[in-house]
Image (spheres, helix red, strand yellow):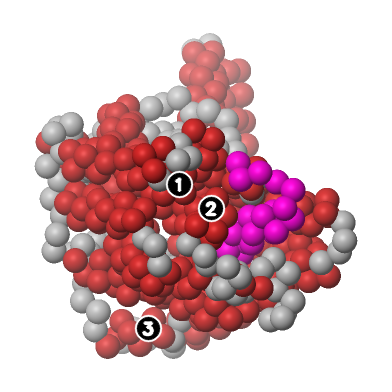
Amino acid sequence: MASSMKDLEINKAVDTASATSDQAAAKEKHDDKHQSTESIHSRDDSGIALDKTEAKKKWFHWHEPGTSKADKKLIFKLDWFLLSYSCLCFFIKYLDQTNISNAYVSGMEEDLGFGPGNQLSWMNTYFSIGVIIGGPISNIVLTVVRPRIWLPSCLFVWSLFVLFLFKCNTASQFYGLRFCVGLAESAAWPGIQYVLGCWYKRSEMASRSGLFVMSGVLGQMFSGYLQSALFDGMEGKGGLSAWRWLFIFDFILAIPVVIYGFIFYPDTPQNTTAFYLTEWEKNRARQRIEEEGRTPVGKLDLTVLKRIFQSWQLYAFSIAYAFWSLTAGSYVMQYFELWLKALGTYSVPQINNIPTSMGAINFAFMVGTGIVADKIGRRGPVFFGVGCLLTFCYAVFTAWPASKGLKMAAFILTGCYGCYTPLLAASVNISCSNDPQLRAFVMAFMVSLGSAVVIPFQQYQFPSGDAPTFSKTHGWASGLVFVIALTLWTGFGIDFVQRIMTRNSDKKQHDSAEVPDSIDV
């Protein structure tokens, strides 16, 4: 570069025409400065000219920098129809998953004479058993039945079982129907995640998965508000208690979502018949995924299984998710409601409304931790920070001090537990990004393992009959042990294992690359 500048100066001294060359060089340098970051985005593999306007790097973007206008139009349609249904379905899923505890503290326990037993815990258990059994079955069916048919059908079926709950009068009836709800509802999470991954690029999935998960948090919160409103306005109407009306209204809310899914859900790029997508957009959707090297993963043979079970990711992330499940954090909102009810100073609407503050904390931490993790490029420190807060909360529960305000704050702040799910999912996606079979298996296995281990744990360590102190079973102390284990493992353990395994892998590659130089004869 320096020599070229000297040549220009010499030419300027002997040739008056060099002024024009200087201007051209200056213009070229100016253009290079502004186009250096956009040159790689100037045209994609499909030959589509991309948007040349490259803004400064932001902490958040909805589209990949340099996305063409045609691609933005395609993505807008996917967001409008595919993502909107995904969010609505997940909203209904968590609405129906949470409604049982709202009903329990809103008159069900007294009306049906459940008393101090563990009926609520068993309702949770039967639901979880249904989820564990139904998940693998749903994944198999999804390979032969169109998602546009299968997923809305599952939503309709589990909503029917939710509707039938309003007629229940015995605990065994609730157990059977809760199992059926879990069995049908198990299709929602893996099915929707699968379809989203078929349409969106990796760089587009993070923000949309976050929105998808947050819709479930809003569903948890809305269930409390709905039960509160029904208690004020529908108690005794039609000869039904307000808690029975909750199941009826949950069914009514699901019907428009079912119809919306049957009409607008786009299936996958390979078999879509969506009327709102042009033929070019359908072809472009397939091409976008192929550009990332994401092709069908093929058969699951012994070679693949050997690679999976020899991977460090399978064990590191499964242990993390098991620790997270064994904290029983997903049930703390129920325990919050039971504590408020046991105090005897709060009305039924207050018992349903106050715990929704946990959902607000959950929402805030999902957004905040995702931003921080992307900003610093590491998830270990974020895991550790959230784990320290959870440790404080569980320490308060274990000590169970006289201060009502301190316990109230601990319950509300425990809402931060929810951010672990998207952070762990992101960690799996990143560490297994080059192996789709490993990524899919690890994601499914860790969730199944977490669901399996928490069933006996919450049943025997956190029986609803011993709520909210769980002094007989030492439930909070057990939870505290797993919170500490979760904090240390996700904060330091996973990173340590990854560094060791990466170093060993690099060493093997380096050793295999060191071969004797060939000799020319």
Does 238 sit left or right of 331 as displayed?
Answer: left
| Disc 1: CA contacts within 10 A as few (<14), some (14-19) or many (>=20) | many
Q: Amino acid at mark 3?
A: Arg
Cα gap from disc 1 to disc 2, whole angstroms: 8 Å
Q: Give the quarter of the figure containing the N terminus.
A: top right
Q: Nearer the viewer, residue 309 or 1?
A: 309
Residue shown at the point (74%, 55%) measured from the top left: 343
Q: Is residue 316 visible?
A: no
Residue shown at the point (51%, 70%) measured from the top left: 119
Q: Amino acid at mark 1?
A: Ser
Q: Amino acid at mark 2?
A: Gly
Q: Which residue is mark 1?
A: 241
Q: Give the quarter of the figure containing the C terminus.
A: bottom left
Q: Which residue is mark 2?
A: 107
Q: Which residue is mark 3?
A: 307
Marks 3 and 1 close (CB-CB < 8 Å): no
Marks 1 and 2 close (CB-CB < 8 Å): yes
Question: Is 284 placed above or below 291 here?
Answer: above
Residue shown at the point (52%, 15%) measured from the top left: 23
**Helix or strand or loop: what does disc 2 sit on?**
helix
Residue 260 in percent (x, y) is at 24, 38
Magenta-span inclusion, residue 340: yes
Residue 397 in percent (x, y) is at 77, 66
Q: Nearer the viewer, residue 63 or 274?
A: 274
Of the residues tagged 3 and 1, which is closer to the observer? Answer: 1
Pick whichever of labels 3 and 1 is earlier in the sequence.
Answer: 1
**Helix or strand or loop: what does disc 3 sit on?**
helix
Q: Which residues are magenta?
A: 329-349
Question: Is 348 placed above or below 28 here?
Answer: below
**Helix or strand or loop: what does disc 1 sit on?**
loop
Magenta-span inclusion, residue 504: no
Cα gap from disc 3 to disc 1, whole angstroms: 55 Å
